[in-house]
Image (cartoon, rainbow, N blue to C red):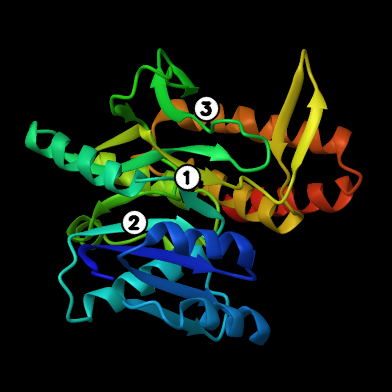
Amino acid sequence: MARNNKIAAITVTYHPDLQLLNQQIAELRDYMWIIFDNNSNYDELAKIEDMIESRPFTYLIKNSENVGLAAAINMAIDFISHQNVDIDFILLLDQDSIPLGNSIELLKKAFCKLEKEGMPVGCVGPQLVDIQTGLQYGFHIINRGMWKRYFPENLNLTPLECSSINGSGTFMRLDLFKKIGGLKGDFFIDHIDTEWSFRVINCGYKLFGVPEAVFEHRMGERSLSFWLLGWKFLPYRSPLRHYYLFRNNISMLWYGYVPVTWKFWSIIKLIFTILVYIVFDRNRKQQLMSMFKGIKDGM
């Protein structure tokens, strides 16, 4: 296997679904791959080691504690920087994301084409499709004071300028990551990609979604479905995840580079989330305690 010596993929693992991780390995083919494990158990690590035993250009970093997603990516980038390798691009992956077909090369092709056209490209990202429901995640854009998702038509495969992109599938130059200063480590998880997106834009770069590149992605362990003028689906989050979601969201309300439009609609979404979990989740007491603790700490 000949390594593509310009792209390094980074996957952060924490008690991963090994079947999905194995599918991810198959799709990464000849790229340099860094697996940063956030203190999974011994058996899980042993199975990951078995998966990658015969795979060249693969590095498993075993961390003795869970430092969170953002800090793990920052540490993985630092690891790459200290290797004697020629890397131009990095690809960030969640442990439950699977690039389909030649989607990684499509991201690189779109990135380079936009650069040649004179665009100040910061990051590009794929179209995400939920593994469980088959629903598209869409691309976030600000349009006439609305924070909304845009779902490209099948015939419209041209890159779309976005207001933020999802963390899994983020494709960028290594130098940009270093220049801007890496991800916000104290966020741990949730809204890491949102804050990063706004910071990239604030530094004068643009974000683009690439509909032609498709990644399967698990939005959550399961979906919370409810009826509200039609069936609605939300990724089900644990109380701990809601703590970080609410804390980081509230924290971002004080950042000057975060768009006012996002701030307004994020508050609406938090209120909506509270109401949905009050009505539809049996574990509503613990959920609410975590949400309000997140609000308190975020302020």
Name the image quarter holding residue 131: top right
Residue shown at the point (62%, 27%) measured from the top left: 268
Marker disc for residue 91: 2
| Local SS, label 3 | helix
Residue shown at the point (33%, 78%) measured from the top left: 56
Label 1: how many Cα within 10 Å (few below 14, some 14–19, many 20+): many
Comparing marks 2 and 1, which lies closer to the viewer?
Answer: 2
Left or right: where does residue 257 sit relative to residue 99?
left
Location of the N terminus (image quadrant) = bottom left
**Residue 185: x percent and y percent?**
44, 65
Distance from the alpha carbon under mark 3 to that under mark 1: 11 Å
**Residue 38: x percent and y percent?**
55, 75
**Residue 147: x percent and y percent?**
48, 24
Distance from the alpha carbon under mark 3 to that under mark 2: 31 Å
Q: Amino acid at mark 2?
A: Leu
Residue shown at the point (80%, 49%) measured from the top left: 287
Q: Amino acid at mark 1?
A: Met
Q: Does residue 122 lie above or below 7 as drawn?
A: above
Badge 3 or badge 2: first in the primary sequence? 2
Marker disc for residue 264: 3
How many discs appear? 3
Marks 3 and 2 close (CB-CB < 8 Å) = no
Marks 2 and 1 close (CB-CB < 8 Å) = no
Distance from the alpha carbon under mark 2 to that under mark 1: 25 Å
| Local SS, label 1 | helix
| Local SS, label 2 | strand
Q: Amino acid at mark 3?
A: Phe
Marker disc for residue 252: 1
Marker disc for residue 98: none
